[in-house]
């Protein structure tokens, strides 16, 4: 899904067809052109005529980044425009009704699809209005927005069901023409099957409703949905190898490493600027995201965090700014696979009187972070609510990501496909690096351990098999251990400072700030959209002991070739580290705590 002006991967474009030849409404055509799209992608060239001319239901499976969003949006908009035109000629017909519903698994996608939709209806906004009901909207505001009778409603299944069950009259569904379920297998993974069954009872399914079920990966569960939602659908499956044989733009590496050395390698990679461009780092749970951020922070490496407990507004803003190149490093928690297993709510005890957690640097203390014997300590319980409708490994159109780094390997091969699909999008090249912990290394260093790494080797062989079928391969990558070793003692020092208590405090601090910002954002930025630029999400969280000396890399630790006067970079494969030295000193200068340049202060 996308809201960009980018072009799709060349391999996906069908240059034997043009949008001009598709007999589309001039207003829609103008919007398509305005976004720089000339030829449809393969999936668009196939699905649009089937949906428009033959009025078929569509089940489509096509790779990540292949342009599935427009494959359903164009027919939906075109048919509604035709319908509105016919209705305009019919003097008896005056009523407004919901004509299309688009269901997506996460709020991130709801926002993204709405943005693409709004661009496509730019020139016909009198005839077609959109409403995303998955966002943070108060019931009163929602009611008044629904009174305007938007023609297309975008939602997650649970939001839509909630609305239908409490206020079915707010949507008039008798004339509904389209139902789209995007990322359909994720919708099912998220446990929405029951919601969909209930929703189907409100919809005129199999009468005059045309359905689109879209995904990059499809599994057997789809059969049931097909039975419930479709009438003799056209099933479009693009053979992945057809497309991927040209797709040499994604280079995949795996790195066998111990649990602790994942942090060490990250430090080296980002401190030396070995990756040129933006990196999206995936971790498997929220705490690990904060641990990594705080460790990197020790060395003056800034990153921002994206996870399911941040408010939806903040999440949207973070993705948006990342896409606009405001941040280079984004640490995203991808825990969607565990959503069913985890409790929705997590109680966290915060010791409010403890000002400085930096004293707690021993590993024993880290094991029991949340208890304190001190009866005088005032404790406050904060309930953190995770958002079930969060997801970033799927469908989100992160733009210009140079590298996806699987800091924690995903727990399924399918999830790997979706994660690495966040790079090498839209005609660009990209690199995927995955850290893999060999079984013999698992559990050797508890504080750096991830529960999921036990299965890393198994998952890696599945991933390799799956990529092998597509003619793609993951290459082993080894770092020059001599060069890396030089950084070890510094990392040990920095790592120790990031206690479990520090992680919890950082997590709560960021949450509080983002909640505050999110509320402020909502009201303030509605009036002053320009100021949105000044809000940053990658501030240092500071609860752990910051050791200023760690922020600088002494010359002797740099690879020989990166030292003064040398031009050639020895073991560094991605990027010239000389540039980075400049950045290091600049970062140091700007890192004063409470400095006036803190952009958050601009909108207080
Ligand atoms: N016809 C086109 N010509 C050029 N670029 C296009 C075209 N259609 C879509 N794109 C661009 O291709 C990128 C990928 O499109 P989109 O996000 O719809 O892919 P997707 O198949 O939904 O991927 P995912 O499965 O990851 O969600 C977007 O940046 C979009 O702007």
Image: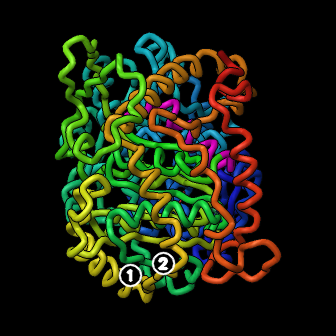
Q: Is residue 199 above or below residue 163?
A: below
Few, some or many residues within 10 Å of mark 1 (<14, 14–19, 20+): some
What SS does tag 1 mark?
helix
Task: Please tell me which residue lies in front, 575 or 117.
Answer: 575
Is 323 magenta? The answer is yes
Q: Locate residue 400 relative to residue 289 in the image: left or right.
A: right
Q: Locate residue 395 relative to residue 566 in the image: left or right.
A: left
Residue 265's tag is none
What count of labels does the image hold? 2
Is 291 magenta? The answer is no
Rendering coords of residue 153 (x, y %)? 46, 34
Q: Residue at x 25, y 71 (%)?
A: 441
Magenta region: 309-326
Q: Locate residue 396 relative to residue 117 in the image: left or right.
A: left
In this view, the mark in front (2 or 1): 2
What SS does tag 2 mark?
strand
Rendering coords of residue 144 (x, y %)? 49, 13
Q: Quadrant of residue 592?
A: top right
Task: Please tell me which residue lies in front, 492 or 216.
Answer: 492
Q: Is mark 1 within 8 Å of ligand 1?
A: no
Q: Residue at x 55, y 72 (%)?
A: 431
Q: Residue at x 76, y 64 (%)?
A: 579
Q: Quadrant of residue 554?
A: bottom right
Quadrant where the C terminus sits is top right
Rendering coords of residue 512 (x, y %)? 45, 23
Rendering coords of residue 456 (x, y %)? 27, 70
- Residue annotated with mark 2: 252
């Amino acid at each position: 899904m996308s809201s960009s002006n980018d072009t799709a991967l060349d391999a996906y474009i069908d240059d034997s067809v043009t949008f001009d030849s598709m007999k589309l409404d001039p207003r829609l055509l103008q919007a398509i052109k305005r976004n720089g799209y000339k030829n449809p992608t393969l999936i668009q060239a196939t699905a649009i005529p089937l949906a428009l001319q033959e009025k078929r239901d569509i089940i489509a499976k096509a790779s990540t980044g292949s342009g599935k969003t427009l494959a359903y949006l164009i027919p939906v908009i075109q048919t509604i425009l035709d319908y509105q035109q016919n209705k305009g000629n019919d003097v008896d017909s005056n009523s407004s009704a919901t004509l299309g519903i688009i269901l997506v698994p996460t709020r991130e996608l709801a926002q993204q699809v709405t943005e693409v939709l709004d661009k496509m209806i730019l020139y016909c906004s009198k005839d077609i209005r959109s409403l995303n009901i998955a966002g943070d909207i108060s019931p009163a505001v929602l009611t008044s927005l629904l009174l305007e009778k938007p023609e297309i409603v975008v939602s997650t299944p649970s939001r839509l069901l909630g609305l239908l069950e409490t206020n079915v009259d707010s949507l008039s569904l008798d004339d509904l023409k389209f139902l789209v379920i995007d990322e359909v297998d994720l919708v099912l993974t998220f446990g929405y099957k029951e919601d969909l069954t209930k929703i189907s009872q409100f919809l005129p399914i199999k009468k005059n409703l045309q359905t689109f079920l879209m995904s990059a990966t499809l599994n057997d569960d789809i059969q049931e949905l097909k039975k419930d939602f479709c009438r003799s659908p056209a099933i479009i499956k693009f053979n992945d190898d057809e497309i991927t044989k040209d797709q040499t733009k994604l280079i995949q590496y795996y790195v066998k490493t111990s649990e602790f050395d994942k942090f060490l390698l990250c430090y080296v990679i980002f401190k030396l600027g070995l990756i040129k461009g933006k990196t999206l780092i995936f971790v498997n749970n929220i705490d690990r995201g904060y641990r990594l951020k705080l460790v990197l922070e020790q060395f003056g490496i800034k990153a921002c965090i994206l996870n399911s407990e941040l408010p939806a507004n903040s999440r949207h803003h973070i993705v948006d700014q990342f896409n606009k190149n405001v941040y280079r490093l984004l640490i995203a928690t991808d825990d969607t696979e565990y959503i069913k297993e985890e409790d929705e709510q997590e109680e966290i005890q915060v010791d409010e009187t403890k000002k400085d957690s930096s004293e707690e640097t021993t590993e024993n203390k880290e094991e029991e972070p949340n208890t304190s014997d001190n009866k005088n300590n005032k404790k406050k319980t904060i309930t953190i609510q995770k958002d079930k409708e969060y997801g970033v490994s799927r469908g989100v159109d992160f733009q210009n990501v140079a590298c996806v780094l699987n800091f924690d390997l995903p727990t399924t091969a399918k999830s790997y496909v979706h994660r690495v699909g966040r790079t090498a999008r839209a005609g660009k090249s990209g690199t995927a690096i995955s850290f893999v912990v060999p079984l013999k290394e698992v559990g050797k260093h508890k504080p750096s351990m991830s529960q999921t790494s036990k299965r890393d080797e198994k998952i890696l062989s599945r991933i390799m098999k799956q990529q092998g079928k597509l003619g793609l391969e993951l290459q082993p990558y080894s770092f020059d251990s001599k060069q890396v070793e030089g950084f070890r003692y510094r990392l040990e020092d920095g790592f120790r400072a990031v206690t479990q208590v520090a992680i919890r405090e950082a997590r709560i601090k960021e949450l509080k700030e983002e909640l505050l910002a999110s509320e402020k954002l909502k009201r303030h930025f509605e009036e002053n959209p320009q100021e949105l630029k000044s809000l940053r999400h990658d501030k240092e969280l500071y609860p752990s002991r910051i050791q200023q000396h760690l922020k600088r890399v002494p010359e002797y630790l740099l690879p020989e070739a990166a030292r003064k006067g040398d031009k050639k970079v020895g073991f560094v494969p991605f990027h010239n580290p000389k540039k980075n030295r400049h950045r290091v000193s600049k970062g140091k200068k700007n890192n004063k705590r409470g400095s006036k340049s803190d952009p958050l202060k601009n909108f207080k």
